[in-house]
Amino acid sequence: MNQNLMDKIVSLCKRRGFIFQSSEIYGGLANTWDYGPFGVELKNNLKKAWWKSVVYQRNDIFGMDAAILMHPKVWEASGHVENFFDLKSDCKGCKKRFKTADLKDAKKCPDCGSELTDSRAFNLMFKTHQGPIEDHSNQIYLRPETAQGMFVNFLNILDSKHPKLPFGMAQIGKSFRNEITPGNITFRTREFEQMEIEYFVKPAEADKYYESWVEDRFNWYINLGINKENIRKRPHAKDELAHYAKACTDIEYSFPFSAAGGSASGRGWSELEGIANRTDFDLKQHEKFSGKSFEYFDDAAKEKFHPYIIEPSGGVDRSVLAFLVDSYYEEKVKDETRVVLKLHRDLAPTKIAVLPLLKNRAPLVELARKITADLKKHFVTVYDDTAAIGKLYRRQDEVGTLFCTTVDVQSLEDNQVTVRDRDTMKQDRVNIEKLREYFTDKLIN
Ligand code: ATP
């Protein structure tokens, strides 16, 4: 049943232009995906919602966009060269590959029960070379996380913005990991986008800010419409924590698959975002490797110290997938099944569709096109007259369009159109001159 749901979502994504397999005409590049016209809108809207909530609506967080390529010393300082390994185990029977950390029993395949190989280490960083000579001295990495781009700019932010603690940096960008168990469409891929915050605090206040970030980030998903029963907070046990971390909580979503395999229900809780108290580890490491002081001077207390870092680190692609799964509904309407994506208004790729009831009546089409052009100045609006009205509604429901505005013969006389709400299917008759105000109220206020 659940796999069935995933199949339906993957099929909808391809059929309607949300997500396509990369390089499909050549047989596809495994586990790599391209976002189509609706996918890119949804993903951009998700990133905008995040940026608005963590940068624009606060006074203490600065936006950043650091380069993907960084000095190789960064990855020595961060510990990635030495420690960014996954342990993998292969099944001798069904040949499936597992992350050893995901296994309950490291000897037995969770899918077929056969014996597993001993686990082997595998560094997840993609290597490449800068410049024409491919030798070790020119070797660099594609960043496996965006976080380091912010740590290495800590001093630049101090010097250019002169912030007082607590303050933070926020960044959205691509990261690359040579994952050993990619899969479940965009859930785990080798190229993906992250949205990360590094929030610098006084060590004595770290616990307090850690707790409040866990709440803030959890509520962000709820406020964007995720069903409460499908999301949870999972604090890490002591033995799960990275050696430098004092605490970590994952925000998990109940996906209709089990990333680790072997789930009886077919559903599995998997990480959407992790919030960690990273202590002063990162700043001290960069101090050690760069020879520059990463201390913060507290004017009031007249003392110098290394701030602690609270890091909320989320995945853009994983969140997009969670919102797609969560908003997918099949509803019986009379004898038909209506497929509808009930995406939050801030996430829906298209806000308004304008549909003429009859496409061969020139004045109707002209009016519908004029309304479209006017609305386009303010809202993401499309025009469609390529099918009968019932089919046009179904098409818009499937991609989550919030409102369908139908122009009919009556509109030419009374200057009114019918606006249908995606979720309730309730229809309002609205004066054309009042449409902008009507949608501003529904979409922005
Ligand atoms: P996982 O163990 O599930 O792969 P992680 O603990 O390694 O994730 P982090 O290093 O904490 O992940 O990265 C922060 C976020 O980035 C994750 O919560 C997830 O949303 C996203 N992310 C990490 N790896 C991938 C990936 N390979 N594909 C897609 N998203 C990813």
Image: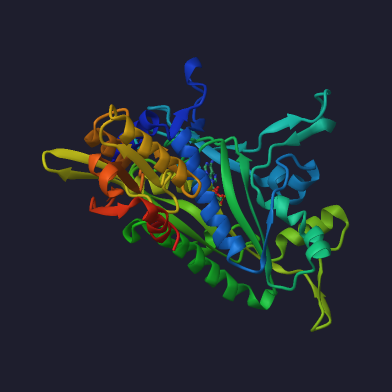
Residue at x-position 62% and y-position 45%? 173
Q: How many marks?
A: 0
Does 297 appear above or below 436?
below
Does 52 appear above or below 432?
below
Q: Position of residue 94 (x, y in %)?
A: 38, 27
Foreground residue among 419 and 414: 414
Q: Is residue 337 left or right of residue 59?
A: left
Is residue 397 in sight in this rendering? Answer: yes
Q: Position of residue 329 (x, y in %)?
A: 27, 46
Is residue 104 in sight in this rendering? Answer: no
Q: Position of residue 396 (x, y in %)?
A: 32, 39
Foreground residue among 410 and 322: 410
Q: Residue furthest top?
A: 26
Foreground residue among 104 and 69: 69
Quadrant placement of the C terminus: bottom left
Q: Position of residue 383 (x, y in %)?
A: 39, 36
Residue 227's quadrant in the figure?
bottom left
Residue at x-position 47% and y-position 52%? 272
Residue 202's quadrant in the figure?
bottom right
Does 267 appear above or below 184?
below
Residue at x-position 58% and y-position 51%? 195
Q: Residue furthest bottom?
A: 301
Q: Is residue 395 left or right of residue 177?
A: left
Foreground residue among 241 and 153: 153
